[in-house]
Every structure is written in structure tokens, then in C-alpha cells.
Image (cartoon, rainbow, N blue to C red):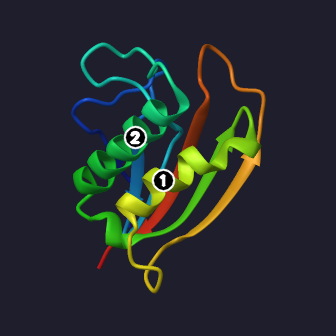
Amino acid sequence: MRRTSIYAEGFSHKNPIPAACRVGSMLYSGSVQGTDPATGAYGATLQAQCRLMFEHVQRIVTAGGGSMDDIIKMTVWMNDRSQRAALNEVWLEFFPDAATRPARHTMQASLDGGKLVECDFIAVIA
């Protein structure tokens, strides 16, 4: 099986890398930040960045041929992990069913350039 680079409209990296890569049914994203798709600027608040980040995740998994239901694991990095309430609020909107949510690991990290949160994810697409 060959790997296929996945690009999503409204999301890109500054470096020459795709938004995700798919091999067979496996889709692995790169780093996903909470940027405005029109301007590339980070959202003004943690809440805004979380929402933008999840909207990008949805665009990327869709571009890879899947849906949010195909995500099995997300890793999230935050400047201040004690502010997970903002992350959880958006998480519950995108994954409302407790019986089918993906696994998630949230870690504190020193993020650069105005980032307050970023993530990556793994999806298995049938």
C-alpha cells in the first residue's frame, strides 16, 4: 500500500507537509492548530482556538475520506492544561455520545507563536 498525502481546504502548514497521511484504512494527521481558515490567524481566545481546531480536524478527516466517527485517538497539547474546561466544551459538541468518543490524551506544553492549543489524531476509515 502506498501512502497518500491529504490536504484540506482552509487548512495548511507553513512547512511543506500535508494535513494528514493515509495508508489503507489508517489516517494520521499532522499538527492541527486553532487558526482562522480565511486569515491563518490564531483565534483570540482559548475557546475560539479550540473550536477552530476541531473544525480543522473535521475538514481533514473528511478530506481523507472519513468522518469524525472514524477518529479513534486524539492527542492535545495546551499551554495551560488546567483550562481543559474550554477544550471539553467543544469536545462534547463534536463527540456528544459518551459511548462512541475517541480516546484523548491532553498534555501541557510550551506552545509558540500565539498557540494556546493544538492536536493530532488517528482515524480508521472503513
Q: Which quadrant: the C terminus?
A: bottom left
Amino acid type, mark 1:
Glu
Q: Residues within 10 Å of mark 1 (few under 14, many from 20)?
A: few
Amino acid type, mark 2:
Arg
* Image spot of residue 66 (x, y percent): 26, 65
* Image spot of residue 76 (x, y percent): 62, 48
Q: Is residue 59 left or right of residue 103?
A: left
Q: Is residue 42 left or right of residue 24?
A: right
Does the rendering let one see residue 2? no
Q: Mark 2 = which residue?
A: 51
Residue 51 or residue 12, whichever sits in front: 51
Residue under the image location 43 percent in, 39 percent down: 53
Q: Which quadrant: the N terminus?
A: bottom left
Residue 31 or residue 25, whichever sits in front: 31
Q: Mark 1 = which residue?
A: 89
Q: Is residue 32 left or right of residue 114?
A: left
Residue under the image location 38 percent in, 71 percent down: 96
